[in-house]
Image (cartoon, rainbow, N blue to C red):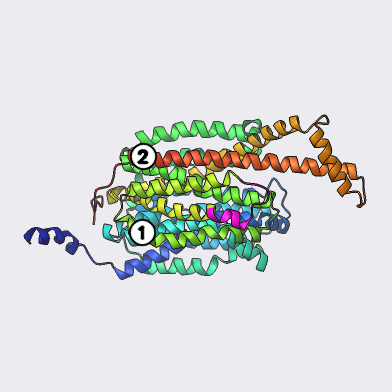
Amino acid sequence: MQATMQAAAPAAAEPPLDRRRMVAFVCMVFGMFMAILDIQIVSASLAEIQAGLSASADEIPWVQTSYLIAEVISIPLSGMLSRVLSTRWMFVISAGGFTLMSLMCATSSSIGEMILWRALQGFIGGGMIPTVFASAFTIFPPSKRSIVSPMIGLVATLAPTIGPTVGGYLTDLFNWHWLFLVNIVPGLFVTVSTWALVDFDQPNLDLLKRFDWAGLGFMAAFLGCLEYVLEEGPLHDWFQEEAVFLAAIVCAVSGVLFFWRAFTAAQPIVDLRAFSDRNFAGGCVFSFVLGIGLYGLTYLYPVYLGRVRGYSALQIGETMFVSGLCMFATAPIAGRFSGRVDPRIMMAIGFTGFAAGTWIVTGITKDWDFWELLLPQVLRGCSLMLCMIPINNIALGTLPPARMKNASGLYNLTRNLGGAVGLALINTALNDRWDLHLARLHERFTWTNPMVLERLDAMARGFAGLAGDPDRMALKAMMGTVRTQGLLMSFSDVFLMLTGLFLAMACATPLIRRPRAGASGGGH
């Protein structure tokens, strides 16, 4: 009886959930949702923005790229800034600045203005993302993580998934300006509510006296150029483009200088010693691969539906919405299991589900539609939640509070970089395999192949009643069929590569050390 009372003592001593803190945290999570959603919300409507601003085809991708480059610099910097300013003022400045930049984006009259405001929107708003992760693991006791971890996991994965859908609907119902105007009212609410409710910590302005400005410059050049190379490289045959080549050189040099400063400065801009924690380092690796699954598949399915099926942005969004529904359904279940099941088992099941979904799509044809993509999307949506929640807990759940803000920035950076690296590799593999399959198909589709000639003749007879040269029309249709088949074969190859990657991660889960039950990292 006495042993039972002693075992129950720590649980009884744990403070009850502070309702004010919970409301403040929910407001912060909503701000994070807006910041992550804005990564993808414009992706389905770039053509409308291009027409509205009279931009060229080369200029319009920078509406997306400028946001991503600025955000990837902001995320690791947020740890230092939140220690200097406090969580309250860091978040108020981020949310308020993000809202103001959203208004400026909506009122842009030229592509130059839009790129400037988008970069500032990404840089200022990016600080909200790691601040929420850090707060979740410092202000709540371990017993409440089954509530807060699914919440931030759902937002971090759902927002980029539904971004193109939301963007498509807004542009279709109103116009492209509403992609940004939709942030104004929620942004003001988040800004005011966090100013009024958040009181988690105090500012430490003394840290500014030893602020590592050189380290900041090296980090900005390193991450900014890395993101640029990964974004633009696949589009310009990598180092054949002079700008990509120069950015790669700057990235390499500034990367070396950044790591030198990180290990030698008295107060580095980013404390890389968090990677000495085995579970944090392992969690970051898994987060990196999860970023590939999250952003890579959010990219691949719309490319297939757009290029092969000819779907509009709205139709693509409606087809992709299944993954979001599955995330909503799985989040509470994964949260309930997170405190009872070995997180490594949940991760193994999640990555195996990812692999099963991509394996199914290796049999893709030009006729695949909503129903053929239903099961792969269900597996993806459920697997994201089964992976995200235990990865969060493993990476951040046992760190001491003093290291949490810095570590949260690094952890979120790995997911974004995973997405950037994944998209670059997927684009490169897709183009290279397409070229390879086209070359092989061209070897078989020759004038000496009787089956090809028979097929061409049948197609020409089908075009005979139409205006124009039926033989030329048949040849053009045949060329289109060959190109489509080559693209489908390259899609199949990429999905097979992703299947192998996800299976490898499922097999690697035993390498992670299981966190001690109730470990909190020392600090509540």
Horizontal side of 253 relative to 475 (left or right) equals left
Amino acid of disc 1: Gly
Q: Is residue 328 above or below residue 305?
A: below
Q: In this view, does 201 lie above or below 273?
A: below
Horizontal and vertical percent for residue 198? 35, 65
Q: Can residue 7 be seen in this view?
A: yes
Residue 269 or residue 46, whichever sits in front: 46
Residue 366 within the segment the image draws in magenta: yes
How busy is the neighbourhood of tag 2: few (under 14 within 10 Å), some, or many (20 plus)?
Answer: some
Give the crowd class for mark 1: few <14, some 14-19, many >=20 residues within 10 Å.
many
- Along the line of sight, which residue is nearer the eye, 372 or 275? 372
| Magenta-tinted stretch | 364-375
Amino acid type, mark 2 = Leu
Q: In which quarter of the image is the C terminus?
A: bottom left
Q: Is mark 1 on a helix, strand or loop?
A: helix
Is residue 42 within the magenta segment? no
Image coordinates of residue 168 in percent, x first then y, are 63, 61
Going from N to C along the chain, the mark reached first, 2 or 1, is 2
Residue at mark 1: 335
Residue 66, horizontal then vertical, whole percent: 58, 48
Query: Cβ–Cβ below 8 Å for labels 2 and 1?
Result: no
* 3D distance between C-alphas at marks 2 and 1: 29 Å
Residue 175 in percent (x, y) is at 67, 65
Q: Kindly identify the residue that appears in the image at 39 percent across and 35 percent down.
A: 261
Label disc, if present, on residue 272 of the rendered structure: 2
Which of the pair 331/486 is nearer the observer? 486
Q: Can residue 217 be seen in this view?
A: no
Quarter of the image containing the N terminus?
bottom left
| Residue 443, picture quadrant | top right
Q: Which residue is drawn at 79% across and 41% down?
A: 478
Looking at the rendered image, the disc whose residue lies closer to the viewer, 2 or 1, is 1
